[in-house]
Amino acid sequence: MFYSITRLFHHRAMLRISALAALMLCQSVSAFSLTPFNAQYKAFRSGMELGSATQTLAENEAGDYTLKFQSSASFLFLSDKRSETSTFAVTDKQLSPRHYRFKRTGTGKDRSTEVRFSADAKEITINQDKTLPWQGEMDNQLFHLDIRRRLAAGETRFSYQTINEKGQPDEETFEMVGEEKLSLPVGDMNTLKLQKVRENSKRETLIWLAPELDYQMVRLRQLKNGKEQLDIQLESYTSNAK
């Protein structure tokens, strides 16, 4: 009985998502555009404010882009600062990674990773001492920007082969699970809700994107064993369209 109810619920949810995707395809005003922006976030854990984060996208004179994420959080005597920087190009309407840097400092062991993607050599260089054949992998944060592009085109499931922040091959899969209206520091937002697909994991990652802000991430929530580990919410957003 429970299995039948679950299947019925899943079927209705997928119909709702399919209808939403069809609506998105018809609304060209909601189409994703690669527009420079500045997004500011507040970070919480179980309702307690821990710190802040910033995500920016900039275009240089050569037409390449830089996507950067920085966060700073502290709790009691613990601290954590992180930064991720992705430099990439747009080739045949596809996002093509060029250079990725990750740095983490604070309580515990500091870490840093540098990854270069060579289109000519078709290889990936990790920390200048390890190479891998490049078979279409993206870096650890650029795929999030590509999800926005594909979501605007009506897709609802997204899988990527990546090189993660440790410089290791990885796989990331997300799927849209519905829509939700959120009350955030920036104000009320109509959003699309995505969930990271994991098997037999105690962790859960949820992401909310706002079509009215070019599918910008407006909230990210991480849980472990049902307990909240991190909740990042949008505080302000500025589009730097030319």
Image (cartoon, rainbow, N blue to C red):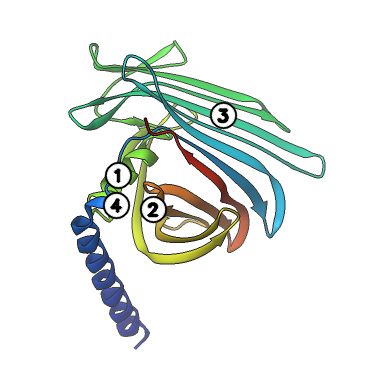
Q: Real-space Cα distance between discs 3 and 2?
A: 27 Å
Q: Real-space Cα distance between discs 1 and 2?
A: 10 Å
Q: Which residue is mark 2?
A: 212
Look at label 1 and name its amino acid.
Phe
> Which residue is pictured at 62% across the width and 53% down the height?
229
- Report crowding for label 3: few under 14, some 14 to 19, many 20 or more residues within 10 A (C-alpha): some
Q: Real-space Cα distance between discs 4 and 1?
A: 6 Å
Residue mark closest to the camera, 3 vs 2: 2
> Which residue is pictured at 28% across the width and 71% down the height?
16
Q: Splitting the image into 4 quarters, where does residue 78 fall?
A: top right
Question: In the rendered image of this protein, does residue 119 appear above or below residue 156?
Answer: above
Say whether disc 1 or disc 2 marks the residue closer to the N-terminus.
Answer: 1
154 horizontally vs 64: left or right: left
Look at label 2 and name its amino acid.
Glu
Q: Which residue is mark 3?
A: 83
Q: Which residue is mark 1?
A: 32
Q: Which residue is mark 4?
A: 30
Residue mark closest to the camera, 3 vs 4: 4
Say whether disc 3 or disc 4 marks the residue closer to the N-terminus.
Answer: 4
Query: In x, y percent, where is residue 31?
Result: 27, 48
216 horizontally vs 89: left or right: right
Look at label 4 and name its amino acid.
Ser
Residue 198 shows up from this direction: no
Say whether disc 1 or disc 3 marks the residue closer to the N-terminus.
Answer: 1
